[in-house]
Amino acid sequence: MKEKGLFPVPGDALVIVDAQNDFLSGGSLAVPQGEQVIPVVNQYLELFRTRRLPVFMTRDWHPPDHVSFLARGGVWPPHCVQGTLGAAFASEIELTGKETIISKADSRDRDSYSNFEETDLEDRLKNLGVRRVFLGGLATDYCVLNTVKDALKLGFEVVLLTDITRAVNVKPGDGERAEEEMIAQGARPADYGAVASRR
Ligand code: VGL
Ligand code: ZN
């Protein structure tokens, strides 16, 4: 069987996961080298926009007393609190307002790392006829991993954009293990050079 190329075509969508200030340097849950992804995110945005293909921006969107925070016995410092600067998308990301924003983990007593959990992401993708998602962002070992696993379970093809994906690495190697797991489950890794090439 001939493998489908990586160049974005109708039926494809771009999903940028949690490119929010709190996950960048200076943020409350900074992902090492998180800011490196920003210029490349802009390149992918431009590629999909030029082709009039759908773009989704996801965000971690917690209430101030969220269950995942240390004060409530969770494992994370407060981060991505609804309406704060930390929860905003990095200002260097060139957004047009036409992107669809998906907010997750927005209820006080429940955390989730998958952008499909208690959101309308699946319905929105399916309503647009999307069959393949090009996905990357922060962080490899949490929200990217869990969103990719759900996407595959739901029947989407997944192209994992490795050049816009970075890991928290609470334990060294977490990011690499997460990437291996996503690939083992069927995600196809690629970078901008591969995706933007028509061959
Ligand atoms: C995330 C840790 C806590 C993520 C969200 O977006 O990967 N990581 N909350
Ligand atoms: Zn969170």
Image: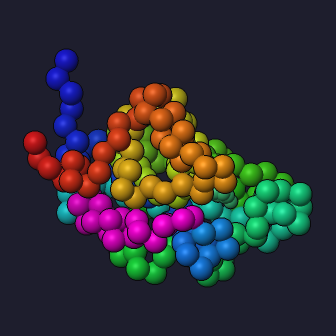
- The structure residue drawn at horizontal position 46% and vertical position 71%, both measured from the top left corner, is 35
Q: Quadrant of the N terminus?
A: top left
Residue 36 painted magenta: yes
Residue occupying the far left of the picture: 199
Q: Main secondary structure of the magenta part?
A: helix
x then y, percent, for residue 139? 55, 55
Nearer-the-camera pick, 87 or 174? 174
x then y, percent, for residue 193? 21, 53
- The structure residue drawn at horizontal position 52% and vertical position 58%, both measured from the top left corner, is 138
| Quadrant field for ligand 2 | bottom right
User: Range of the magenta residues?
Assistant: 31-49
Nearer-the-camera pick, 30 or 195? 30
Q: Is residue 9 left or right of residue 172?
A: left
Please tell me in which quadrant of the rendered image residue 155 appears.
top left
Indicate whether 199 appears above or below 90: above
Q: Is residue 94 left or right of residue 49?
A: right
Indicate whether 146 appears above or below 15: above
